[in-house]
Image (tube, coloured by chain):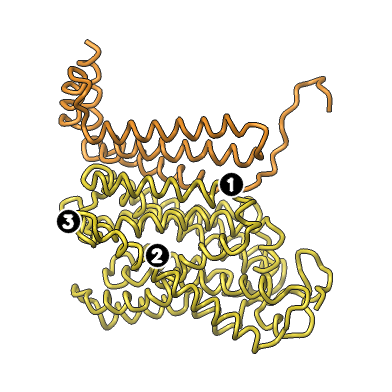
Amino acid sequence: MREAAAGVVLAVFAGSAPAADVAVGASDPISVTPREMFLAAGIGVMAMCGLTSFFLAGRVTERTHVALAMLVVLIGGFCLFTLFGLVGREIPVTGALVLLGLIGLFKLMNQFEIGRNRTPRTKKGSDK
Amino acid sequence: MTAPSLYFVNWWADTLIIGGWSILTWIALLAFYNSADTQPIFWLSLVLSLVVNYPHFSATVYRLYQNPENIRQFPVTAWGLPLIMVGAVGASLWQPNVVAPYFLMLFLVWSPYHYSGQTVGLTMVYARRAGFSIGRRERMGLSAFVFSAFVCGVIRFQQTGSSGGFIDFYGMSVPVVPLPDWMNAAAHAVMWTGALVFAGFAVVWCLRQKRLIPPIVLLPALTHFVWFVPGAGLKSFWIVIPFFHSLQYLLVALAMQLKIRIDVAGGEHSWRRIGVEARRWGSRNILGGVLLFIGLPAAFSWLPLPLLTTAGILAAAVNIHHFFVDGVIWKLRDAATSSALMMNIAELAGPAVVDRARPKPVEV
């Protein structure tokens, strides 16, 4: 049932071929498609960025932690782009969303590793 | 303290480099070379790439890595990002049919966005020099105009440059981002609204100041408009747009480099020294550019892929790295950057220089 549901979702969003990939891949966990391998690598790198941030806690500046978090967003965004980048061929309006998503990603990356004048919010009554 | 000069060099040099040459080129191509055969322009731009486009990427790398303090200040950009780019290149070379098309698509959309950012930045620099204050509302109008022009350009490039939904890039078929038909009209509407809002602020400023706004303030946005709206319909012109973008960049980067190298304690302030520094910086960046765009692909020529494919993927990676580094090193909020971006190169030939961000005479 779960495989069928995943297949239907991918068929709607990314065409019938990747849906078939999922169906095959789910029955045989050893045979993964190139796209799945890439996505696995992407998830691995995202986890590595998170771990790096965790182990560097207290040793590097907040700016470095934010930059590592932005790398996670970049990799995640690119992985999503490889999955849904051409959805607009089937559903035109999603093409606009993909472009707006990319612009948002670029705008965010424009803030990469720069100091921002942001003061942390303090709770009412907390020490200054 | 004297008012900052309006130009990095002078009226002629700044006007031509920031947009004059590209607008004249567009007019000339429109009038005399509205041909489908873009090969002669392509070869000409390839030669020009060696001395302008490629060095412009190298200049960014040089600016970041020339000073160990920069590397300490931006460790993720200096070390983490190149690793991610190596990973992206590795994934693209490993899966040239699954990953590479999306990596190249990302680059092809990011590149004009990056040009838009430079247009906004240049407008801010010249506005500050002219005393035209760009606040939140003015910036919103300017950004709406510039970034919508970029969307119009992407739509037009995709319409006229693609065949069957694919663009040819370094011999590879890169899919275009499929967009709905209404998006072009929406982008035009936002662009003209932004233009009207920004023009309104400019008119108010002129009335209050009782003088005209210096044309150089509006030239980056006008140039951007020509590149992405009327220029996007002329195939021979697209090929040279990166050249003009790089030329703008090199003017500012050279001014910054001269400021860093000459305007230091004990630095010799003379035209001779400016010439020496400019030649040294230029030759290093030409060499760096050749290494990045010719040496690097040649080093990977052993891969079982067409050399052009490898070169295209590596070029995309160098570009994306450049987009990040540029965002880090050119922040106007940074006092040193802001100071360098307010100077005129001739100031470095004089005996004393005033640092505009920290207005104290610099030791000579």
Q: Residue A39, located in which quarter of the rendered image?
A: top left
Residue at numbered disc 3: B163
State the image coordinates of residue B124 (x, y, percent, origin top left): 61, 62
Q: Residue B40, located in which quarter of the rendered image?
A: bottom left
Same subunit, labels 1 and 2: the answer reads no
State the image coordinates of residue A38 (x, y, percent, origin top left): 30, 36
User: Considering only vertical position in the picture, is A89 above or below B220?
Assistant: above
What's the CA distance linking mark 3 and mark 1? 39 Å
Furthest toward the bottom, the residue is B272
Give the drawing colour for chain A.
orange
Residue at numbered disc 1: A113
State the image coordinates of residue B283 (x, y, percent, origin top left): 49, 78
Q: Amino acid at mark 1?
A: Glu
The 10 Å Cα crowd at callout 3, few under 14, some 14 to 19, many 20 or more, is few
- Indicate left or right for B239 with B226 as reference: left
Where, quadrant-wise, is the N terminus of chain A in this rendering? top left
Q: Which chain is yellow?
A: B
Q: Amino acid at mark 3?
A: Ser
The chain letter under disc 3 is B
